[in-house]
Amino acid sequence: MEYNIAVIKGDGIGPEVVDAATSVLDKVGEKYGHSFRYEYVLAGGAAIDQVGECLPSETVRICKESDGVLLGAVGGPKWDDVPGDQRPERALLGLRKELGLYANLRPAMVFDELSAASPLKAEIIAGGLDILVVRELTGGIYFGERATKETPEGLVAYDVEKYSEGEIRRIAKTAFDMAMKRNRHVTSVDKANVLDSSRLWRKIVAEVAEEYPEVALDNMYVDNAAMQLVRNPKQFDVILTSNIFGDILSDEASQITGSIGMLPSASLADGNFGMYEPVHGSAPDIAGKNIANPLATILSVAMMLRYTLGLSDEADAIEKAVDQFLKKGYRTFDIAGGGDTPLGTRETGEKVAELVG
Ligand code: NAD
């Protein structure tokens, strides 16, 4: 089978980690008889430099025509003085909106071999950790009405948190569908003791839960969820939440794993279409040195195979290869211990590709 992947390398370490990930994907193609065609497109700082805008319409068109999108990372100090609405990171908001990517999936996993990297005590994460944060991505306060106004009392600013029934229902379904493939437990996080939007959230999530009798549903206030994530993270399987709460909680969840270079993410639209990227940013401090950890991007490719291309054996093969990589004692610079000899970005891609084969 032939697949067309739109690839946005982006800025900083983006090109390095993407090259390593596509080398693994090429190996999967060889082994399983698929052909992956890459169409390289511009977004972020690289797009500003080359065509004067962070998200050219040509990029959006090619992404829409592709089977799926792979993104490295965008942004960096070089573009710090660019006005807010044209900054490299605005390309991400534009892509989410244009491609209808309303469901953000962020697994937070602690690999057994890397448990020492977690800032949490060993007994809290003993036996590993595997949480999936499902965050609504195109609604809520980040997209609601906003304004800053002069009033007789001085300046007043507001941002509106608004959710429709339909927006809540579709993200809740995503979370329950994911839970069915995992440990069948959804924790819906809201602030229903204070916010009307959260009370509607809770009502609709309860309705959706009725369609999934095998899945257990808990509701949790966001302040408690922030606390429970560090006190007892193993109680979570799937965390379902709104755009702003998910933004904060998924970063917290990723930090408790201790290795940001290991965490993939998927942003899904209706149907199977999706955009896949590592959780980390463009890491300008280590760009161009062949020391970035490409495993998050490689694992993002595995998510693309599973969720967008429906190739779960191939996805498993990548995840197993990464597992083998760690079990055999290979490490990248960010996760290397005293006695380890770390592999570079390119060499890590080559080694994982070899383990796939
Ligand atoms: P960052 O994730 O880029 O880096 C944070 C720290 O983690 C740095 O010390 C970096 O060296 C390290 N790190 C990150 N990824 C790594 C990897 N794969 N291997 C080894 N070490 C890694 O976050 P930041 O420094 O806050 O942001 C840098 C730039 O990235 C900013 O311009 C920011 O806006 C942008 N950013 C982009 C995205 C995205 O494209 N999705 C996400 C977050 C931040």
Image (cartoon, rainbow, N blue to C red):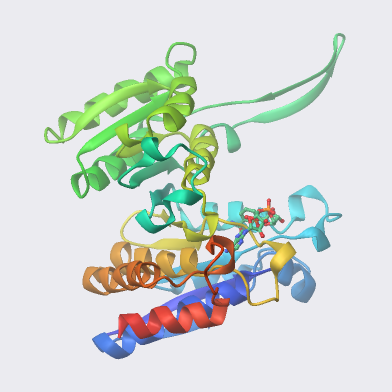
Toward the viewer: 66 or 44? 44
Looking at the picture, how far across and down is residue 354, in whole percent?
37, 85
Q: Please name whichever residue, 144 or 190, is drawn nearer the observer in this view of the structure.
A: 190
Quarter the C terminus occupies: bottom left
| Residue shown at 23% from the left, 46% from the top | 177
> From where the camera sits, is residue 287 visible?
yes
Judge whether residue 40 can be spotted in this image. Answer: no
The image shows residue 45, relative to residue 177, as above or below, that is below
Q: Is residue 170 above or below residue 101?
A: above
Q: Give the residue at the far front of this rendering.
A: 339
How far from the left and from the top, in percent, is residue 60? 56, 67
Q: Nearer the viewer, residue 119 or 267?
A: 119
Q: Residue at x 31, y 58 (%)?
A: 271
In the image, residue 183 lies at what x, y percent?
21, 42
Q: Is residue 150 left or right of residue 71?
A: right
| Image quadrant where one finds the N terminus | bottom left
